[in-house]
Image (tube, rainbow, N blue to C red):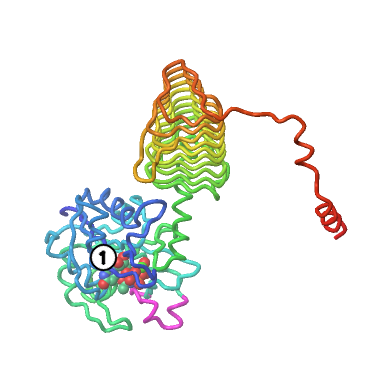
Amino acid sequence: MGETWAVILAAGEGKRMISSLPKVLHPLCGRPMLRYVAEAAAAVADGRVIIVIGRGAHLVQEEMGTGWRYAFQEEQLGTGHALMQALPQLPEEGLLLVLCGDTPLIETAHLEQLLQEHGRNAATVLTTTLADPSGYGRIVRHADGRIRIVEESDASPEEKQIGEINSGAYCFDLKHLRRRLPALTTDNAQQEYYLTDVIGLLQEEGLPVGACCIEDWRAVLGINDRCQLAEAAEIMRQRINSALMRQGVTIVDPTSTYIDFGVHIGPDTVIMPQTVIEGRTVIGSNCRIGPGAHIIDTEIHDGVIFRQSVSERSVIESEALVGPFAYIRPGSRIGPRVKIGDFVEVKNARIDAGTKVPHLSYVGDVDIGSGVNVGAGVIVVNFDGRRKHRSYIGKGAFIGCNSNLISPVEIGAGAFVAAGTTVTENVPPDALAIARPEQKNCPGVAPRLLRKSDAQKEKDGEEEKK
Ligand code: UD1
Ligand code: CA
C-alpha cells in the first residue's frame, strides 16, 4: 500500500481576511492556525508533511520552522494548482491526505476516520452537514452513488440548498491522483484549477470515490474571514478549557476565561472569571488566579494567589500573594511567600522569600533579600535619564514609607531607612539612615492660615445658594 503522506495547502492570500499577515498565520488561542493542521497531519502521516506556501512564503516558513517539507506555489491559481506543486516531492504510490491550512479545528481522530473509510477508494472526501453551508463547496450525491463537488460560485439555486459540504480534507490514492491532477482546467466561475474537480475526473474513469461524513461539524470549520476566525477561536477555547477541567482545574466561568494552547495548569487551581492566560505560561497546583488576571509567559508555582494583576515573562514562587492591581514586568522573580500588594510595579527585580512590598511602590532593577519590609510609596529610582542602574537591599532590612532609593545604592542587611528618606549613599548593615529636613513647629499660627477673608466668605455663601 505504501506510505501515508500529507500535503497542506497554505499558499492562498486570504483576501477575505483583509490583512498583511498571511491567513494561515493568524493565531487561534496563541498559535497560528496552520500549526494545528500541520501537527494533526504529522501525527497520522508520521511526519511526512509537505506545506504548500506562496503568499508571504518567507513569513510562513519562518514561523513554522524546519521539520516540515515545503513546496512553493508562485501564482495562486487554485487549490488544484497548489497540490500540483507538491507532486514532485511525493512518491509514486501510497496514500495522500490533502488538508487546507485554514481549517485548524480538524483533529487526528478525524483524519484517522477518513483514512479508515477510504479503504481502497481512489479518493475520499471528508464532509459534514451544516445548518448554514454558505461559502463552502456542496456535495451533490447522485442516485448511482457518484458524488460531485460544486463550489458556491458555480452552484445552481437548488444546489445551494444542499447542507452537506466539502471540508477541504481528502484522502487520495497517489497513483490515480498523479494521473488525473494534470487534467484539471480553469473552466469555472473563479477561473481557477479546482482540486475538487479531480473527484469528478476519477469517477469518469469508473474509479470508486467516497464521502466520509462526520457528525462534528465544528471540526471542519474553514476560516476565510475574521468572523469565522472568532468562531473557531471560541471552539478551540472550549476544547482547551474542557481539557484543563478534566485535569482537575476549576474554571469558574469557562465562557470568560481565555487560555492559550499549551498553557499548563496543575490540579486544584481555581481560575476566576475574566482571566487571560497566554504564551508559555505554567501554573502549579492549588493556586487561585483572578478574577481579571492577565498572565503572559509566566511560571507560577504552587499555592500562589494572583488577583486582578498583570504578569509577563516572570517567575512567581510558591505561596506568593500578588495584587490586586500589581504589575509584574519581564525579568522578575518573586520568591516564596512574598507579598506584592496593590498598585505595585515590579520590573526586572529579584525579591527573596517572605519579603513584603504591600502598597504603591515602584521596584525596578533591584535585588531584595528575604524578610524585607518595603513601606508604602517606596520608589527605586533606577533611571538617571540616560542609563538604568541596579540596587541591592539586604535581608531583613526595613525601608520606611515614601523613601526613594537613588540607584545604584546598597542597603545592608538589617538596616533601617527612615520614612521619607532619599537614599543616595550605601547604608551599612544594621545602620539607621535618615535624610529629611528637620521639622519646625510654629505655635498658634494655624488659625490665621485657616481664617477666610471676608471676600472668600461671601463667594462661598453664593456657591451654597446655587
Ligand atoms: C475550498 C474548497 C471548498 C471547500 C472549502 C473548505 C476548492 C476549489 N474549494 O474553498 O469546496 O468547501 O475549501 O474550507 O478547493 N490555496 C492555495 N493556493 C491557491 C488557492 C488556495 O494554497 O491557489 C490554499 C489556501 O491557502 C487555503 C486552502 O487552499 O488554505 C483553501 O483555499 P480557499 O481559497 O480558502 O478555498 P475555499 O474558497 O474556502
Ligand atoms: Ca477556505
Of 210 and 166, nearer the camera is 166
Location of residue 158 (image quadrant): bottom left
Residue situated furthest right in the rendering: 465
Of 413 and 368, nearer the camera is 413
Does residue 240 appear to the left or right of 358 in the view shown? left
Of 354 and 124, nearer the camera is 354
Q: Secondary structure at mark 1?
A: loop
* x, y percent for residue 116: 30, 54
Please give the name of the residue rendered at 38% of the width and 71% of the height, measured from the top-left corner.
Answer: 18
Amino acid at pointer 1: Gly
Is 431 above or below relative to 298? above
Location of residue 315 (image quadrant): top left
Residue situated furthest top in the rendering: 430
Q: Is mark 1 within 8 Å of ligand 1?
A: no
10 Å crowding of disc 1: few (<14), some (14-19), many (20+): some
* x, y percent for residue 78: 26, 74
Does residue 206 appear to the left or right of 417 in the view shown? left
Ligand 2 quarter of the rendering:
bottom left
Q: Quarter holding the C terminus?
A: bottom right
Please give the name of the residue rendered at 44% of the width and 52% of the height, measured from the top-left corner.
Answer: 236
The residue labelled by disc 1 is 56
* x, y percent for residue 388: 36, 40
* x, y percent for residue 260: 42, 47
Is 397 above or below relative to 231? above
**Is 158 inside the magenta-drawn segment?**
yes
**Is 78 inside the magenta-drawn segment?**
no
Is 152 above or below relative to 113? below
Q: Is residue 210 visible to the viewer in this orientation of the structure?
A: no
Please give the name of the residue rendered at 45% of the width and 48% of the height, measured from the top-left corner.
Answer: 239
Q: Quarter holding the N terminus?
A: bottom left
What span is colored magenta in the figure? 143-161
